Image (spheres, rainbow, N blue to C red):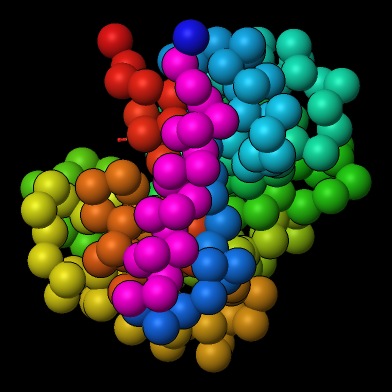
Amino acid sequence: MIAIKDNIAAVELQISSACYQAHRHADEITLLAVSKTKTVELIEQAYDVGQRAFGESYVQEAVEKIIALQNKTDISWHFIGPIQTNKTKLIAEHFSWVHSIDRAKVAKRLNEHRSAQDTPLNVCLQVNISGEESKSGVFIDELPSLLTTVNDCENLCLRGLMAIPEKNASQASFIKMQKLFESLQKQYPTMDTLSMGMSADLQLAINAGSTLVRIGSAIFGARE
Ligand SMILES: *Cc1c(COP(=O)(O)O)cnc(C)c1O
């Protein structure tokens, strides 16, 4: 059996040590446990040691797990994968957060489908900071118009930005995200979340103001 409990404790230690080096407090950082491809049983093990925020990337698989765990009403489910427009209904119905909005059409559809729920969907816009190389995320020059669209969606709550910097990205690209985020916070006061940082780049992300790190394999083991 994989020692989920030990893995979470180790990741939390990594977060506090990164915070210490960055002169930040560990309670400023949310640990999102990325459970894609992992079983309900493993998620329950994480839940039993206090983990409450889980990230998923594949809609069908995620919805099955969310339904199986629906009695644990204090779990917050975050959708972090690429969004196909034909999946927006399921996402709006089952998740409380979406990190990967990258175009207006997706935002509008999530907003429509969320109208049936009594709480707004918390959303981050995924920004493509590495330019052409990565496929997902809105380019920085298209971000202002997407922000306006999302901010006008009454069933979406604009919470922040998400980024997946390219492998071996420098500290500078993380700082670029931080500056962008902080400048937008003045204009959009509901923005309080910078979703940035994975196992390999935790320190760089926390140095640059990340408020949420998305950790999968370090908690649940490698994916097949
Ligand atoms: C899978 C995934 C993660 C977690 O990656 P690990 O390398 O397993 O920690 C984080 N963010 C996103 C967007 C992912 O798809």
Left/right placement of residue 101 relative to residue 49 reads left
Across and down, in percent, residue 175 comes to: 25, 77
* Residue 162 to residue 1: above or below: below
Quadrant of residue 41 within the rendered picture: top right
The residue shown at (54%, 90%) is: 186
Total count of labels: 0
Left/right placement of residue 50 relative to residue 151 reads right
* Residue 111 to residue 1: above or below: below
Across and down, in percent, residue 223 comes to: 32, 17
Q: Quadrant of the C terminus?
A: top left
Quadrant of residue 209 within the rendered picture: bottom left
Magenta part of the chain: 2-21
Left/right placement of residue 68 relative to residue 182 reads right
Quadrant of residue 51 within the rendered picture: top right
Across and down, in percent, residue 47 comes to: 69, 30
The residue shown at (43%, 58%) is: 15
Seen from the viewer's position, the closer of residues 14 and 63 is: 14
* Residue 170 to residue 57: above or below: below
Q: Is 185 one of the magenta-colored residues?
A: no
Main SS, magenta residues? helix
* Residue 63 to residue 196: above or below: above
Q: Assign ligand 1 to one image quadrant.
A: top left
The residue shown at (81%, 21%) is: 70
Q: Is residue 26 visible?
A: yes
Left/right placement of residue 96 relative to residue 206 reads right
Across and down, in percent, residue 162 comes to: 41, 57
Q: Is 18 one of the magenta-colored residues?
A: yes
